[in-house]
Amino acid sequence: MEDKLKYATDREKEAYKYRQTGMSYNKIGEKMRISPSRANQLCKSAERRIRSYEAHCELHKKELETFSQPLDISISKGEGNLIYDLLYERMKYYEKEFKIRHDVTNPYREVNKSKLPYEYFLFRDLYEKVAKSLDKPIYLI
């Protein structure tokens, strides 16, 4: 279950786990100090993430057996820069496609990522790894 909720927010995970124990949205709301409708929203968002994860797994079922095995490839710094740029562009595409807006007036405000598909987070993780290996800045939402 933890993998399915890997990219859920802490609040989504908490609400979802309470719901799985049979708690009502009213009880979840009381426990988390939020409204019952907000508890419902958090649970639905977590469920959306789980469905996205499961759809990804179903689509790539054959590849998942070897999914986490490291590759032994050698690439040049120029090729690494190209991968860095392509991954960044792909993440921007997802942000545009799913209407993710940055709040430039308040950079500390949490951006709603609940509608982003599981693949976005895979791209983001890979982007971070490539950026670190190239000593490049990381621009993420």
Image (spheres, grey):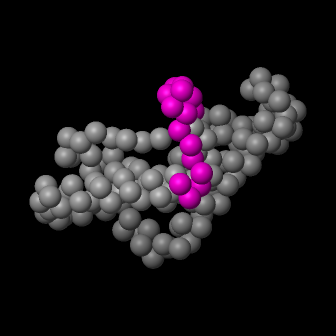
Q: Is residue 1 left or right of residue 138?
A: right
In x, y percent, where is residue 91?
44, 54
Is residue 65 shown in magenta?
Answer: no
Q: Residue at x 60, y 51 (%)?
A: 99
In x, y percent, where is residue 130?
26, 50
Q: Magenta segment, which residues?
A: 96-110
Q: Is residue 2 visible?
A: no
In x, y percent, where is residue 113?
58, 45
Q: Residue at x 72, y 41 (%)?
A: 42
Q: Is residue 53 left or right of residue 32?
A: left
Q: Residue at x 53, y 38 (%)?
A: 102
Main SS, magenta residues = loop
Q: Is residue 43 left or right of residue 101?
A: right
Q: Residue at x 52, y 52 (%)?
A: 95
The answer to which image quadrant residue 70 occupies is bottom left
Outermost residue, bottom direction? 62
Asked if residue 50 is positioned above or below residue 62 in the image, the reply reads above
Asked if residue 27 is positioned above or below residue 130 in the image, the reply reads above
The answer to which image quadrant residue 140 occupies is top left
- Residue 89 or residue 22, whichever sits in front: 89
